Image: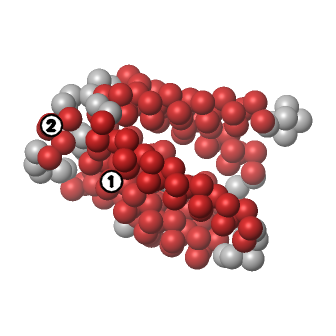
């Protein structure tokens, strides 16, 4: 379902003005940050391995399709929306949501990438970002068990707000 949403989102992205797309991205980041900062983490780190309640499958279908649509439309991994969706809508502990989102992102990004096409890929920049991301992922995986879930959730929300500020600051007023 996420893959179908990713294909639909990538097709929709071609039909929407870049300014509208960027404005939507900023709003979505801000809403995800608000949700993550507003919600109090209800699970202690030792609760991360407890079984989750049976999910509402209608909600799961909507989330999967929505995350895929966002991934394809904005051309991003979708972690900024997948993690909050899993935490807020499915009540998944932050650590489990982060790990689950990585698998979801891998599938959705691959499908969205193929749907967008590869003719505009900058190989050098892609390699630099990929190496930096890999190093950050390893460091994050090593640090994650030492940080309480509530702190991870708040940090994620704050980082989303920082990203919003950087995007808004970096966009010239002429663009809007």
Residue sitting nearer the eye, 152 or 167 = 152
If you read the primary sequence from the N terminus, does the residue marked by circle 1 or circle 2 appear first? 2
Could you say which is closer to the camera, residue 96 or residue 56? 96
Considering only vertical position in the picture, is 80 above or below 30? below
- Would residue 140 be found to the left or right of residue 29 on screen? left
User: Label 1: how many residues lie within 10 Å, few (<14), some (14-19) or many (20+)?
Assistant: few
Q: From the top left corner, tell me how far across and down residue 44 is, in percent.
A: 18, 31
Q: Residue at x 75, y 77 (%)?
A: 119
Q: Which residue is mark 2?
A: 46
Between 146 and 27, the residue placed more toward the observer is: 146
Mark 2 neighbour class, 10 Å CA radius: few under 14, some 14 to 19, many 20 or more: few
The local secondary structure at tag 2 comes to helix
* Quadrant of the drawing holding the N terminus: bottom left
Residue at (46% x, 27% y) in the render = 34
Q: Quadrant of residue 167?
A: top right
Q: Residue at x 17, y 50 (%)?
A: 55
Give left or right: position of 4 versus 168: left
Residue 46 in the figure: left or right of residue 60: left
CA–CA distance in space, label 1 to label 2: 16 Å
Residue on which the image places disc 1: 99
Determine whether 34 is above or below 82 in the image. above
Whether residue 128 sits left or right of residue 89 in the image: it is right
Q: Is residue 155 above or below residue 62?
A: above
Q: Residue at x 44, y 60 (%)?
A: 105
Foreground residue among 84 and 175: 84
Front: mark 1 or 2: 2
Check disc 1 and report its element: helix, strand or loop: helix
* Numbered badge on residue 20: none
């Amino acid at each position: 379902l996420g893959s179908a949403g990713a294909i639909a989102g990538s097709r929709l992205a071609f039909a929407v003005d870049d300014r509208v797309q960027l404005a939507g991205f900023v709003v979505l980041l801000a809403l995800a940050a608000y949700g993550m900062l507003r919600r109090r983490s209800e699970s202690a780190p030792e609760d991360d391995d407890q079984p989750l309640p049976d999910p509402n499958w209608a909600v799961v279908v909507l989330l999967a399709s929505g995350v895929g649509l966002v991934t394809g439309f904005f051309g991003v991994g979708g972690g900024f929306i997948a993690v909050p969706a899993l935490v807020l809508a499915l009540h998944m502990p932050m650590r489990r949501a982060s790990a689950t989102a990585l698998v979801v992102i891998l599938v959705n990004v691959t499908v969205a990438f193929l749907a967008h096409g590869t003719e505009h890929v900058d190989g050098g920049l892609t390699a630099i970002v990929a190496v930096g991301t890999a190093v950050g992922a390893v460091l994050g995986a090593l640090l994650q068990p030492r940080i309480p879930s509530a702190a991870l959730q708040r940090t994620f929300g704050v980082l989303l707000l920082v990203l919003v500020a950087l995007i808004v600051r970096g966009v010239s007023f002429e663009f809007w």
